[in-house]
Amino acid sequence: MNAALDKIKNSRKIKIALLSIFGITTLVFLAIELYEYIVYERTDDAFVEGTIVPIAPQISGKVVKVYVDHNQRVKKGDPLFEIESDDYLAELNAKKALVEALQNQSAEIASSLNETTAKLNTAEANLQSAQANRVLAEREYERVKKLYEEDLVSKSRLDNAEASLKVAIAQEKAAEAIIREVKTAINTLTIKLKTQQSQIKKALEEYKIAETNLRRTTVFAPIDGRIAKKSVELGQFVRAGQLVMAVVDEQNTWIVANFKETQLKKMRVGQPVKIKVDAYGKVFKGHVESFQPGTGAVFSLFPPENATGNFVKVVQRIPVKIVIDSSFDPNYPLWPGMSVVASVDVTVNTGPKLKDVQKSSQ
């Protein structure tokens, strides 16, 4: 009988102990939840955002090599895929040949211009000589004419002097005509040379474009990251601007948390944030960097039109950018689109609040 009573007493003690433990655990849990409720503003409407660089060729052509596969890590400058280069190489050679031909023609025109300029110098010297001969012939004619008027020379002597003067005048006019002709040729060659130089400039620009297009036959990774949404295959014809893959920067990520507008009363720029990632259950550290200047609904494809129809007030959400302070951990990579729970410690008095952001930026 005593053993049964002892057993009942021990059973009661165990029940009381268990109830005490349960009560203490419940109180601790409630205290933690109360503390979390007072200290933190939390939302599960939060996602990882990051740098995603779409990859598209800048030229069209058939893909002859693919260097990467789905989800593969790449470094900046690594080749991703290659487009057939035969047509672009042929175009480059044609542009190069055109540039060389135009340059040769320009050199010939420049040589002709130099020769014509030298002819102009000779023609100007001949003109000076003809002018001097004409002056001498005029003086001789005037002198012989006076002597003839005084009957000191014969009529034939006067005729000879007059003929010599006419010859000198004709030679001078001929020299002037040659100079005009040479100057016209110089002007023509100068215009032709300028036109040729303009054509060379245009051909060089086309050559550089062809050279650039040839380099673009190989597409390289613009950043370090991982390949995503790969849709290019060997032998596929791709067009300029066609999206064929993307490179995701694993290390340049941040959080966009959509808090209710009623949660932003105590929230400030710089406040610490606990970031719990659903995929890992791991908590990262971060801080509030900025507030989006508008609710998410305003920037949606079809923003609400509250002025039409019946109005039902709905609490809006404002995206808050949270920078991740924890160092990158390759064992727990944060990829764009992953769901997180963001908890902001609103008791920390740091930067400006939402209402003060505009003032602080002015």
Image (spheres, rainbow, N blue to C red):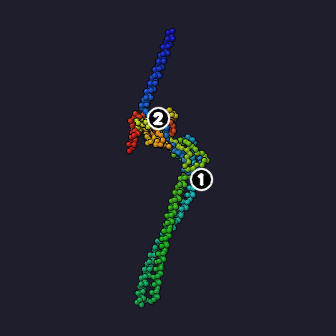
Towards the viewer: 348 or 249? 348
**Distance of label 1 from label 2 (alpha carbons):** 56 Å
**For the residue carrying disc 1, how many other residues have a C-alpha within 10 Å: few (<14), some (14-19), or many (20+)?**
few
- The residue depicted at 41 percent of the width and 39 percent of the height is 354
Residue at the limit of the structure toward the front, as seen here:
309
Q: How far across and down, in percent of the image, does residue 349 sit?
A: 38, 35
Residue type for callout 1: Asp
Residue nearer the viewer, 268 or 152:
268
Q: Element type at marker 1?
A: helix
Percent coordinates x, y for residue 25 in the rendering: 46, 24
Q: Residue at x 42, y 34 (%)?
A: 345
Q: Is residue 111 visible?
A: no
Element on which disc 2 rests: strand
Residue at (50%, 68%) from the top-left corner? 188
Give the label, 1 or 2, closer to the camera.
Answer: 2
> Can the viewer see residue 242 in this picture?
yes
C-beta proximity under 8 Å, tags 1 and 2: no
- Classify residue 30 by image quadrant: top left
Q: Earlier in the sequence, mark 1 or mark 2?
A: 2
| Residue type, mark 2 in image | Thr
Q: Is residue 326 above or below residue 112?
A: above
Q: Nearer the viewer, residue 171 or 37?
A: 37
The numbered mark at residue 318 is none
| Residue 62 pos. (x, y %) | 60, 49
Q: Nearer the viewer, residue 240 or 178?
A: 240
Q: Residue beneath label 1, please?
A: 86
Residue ID for mark 2: 43
- Horizontal and vertical percent for residue 107? 52, 64
Residue drawn at x 44%, y 75% is 128
Q: Residue furthest top?
A: 1
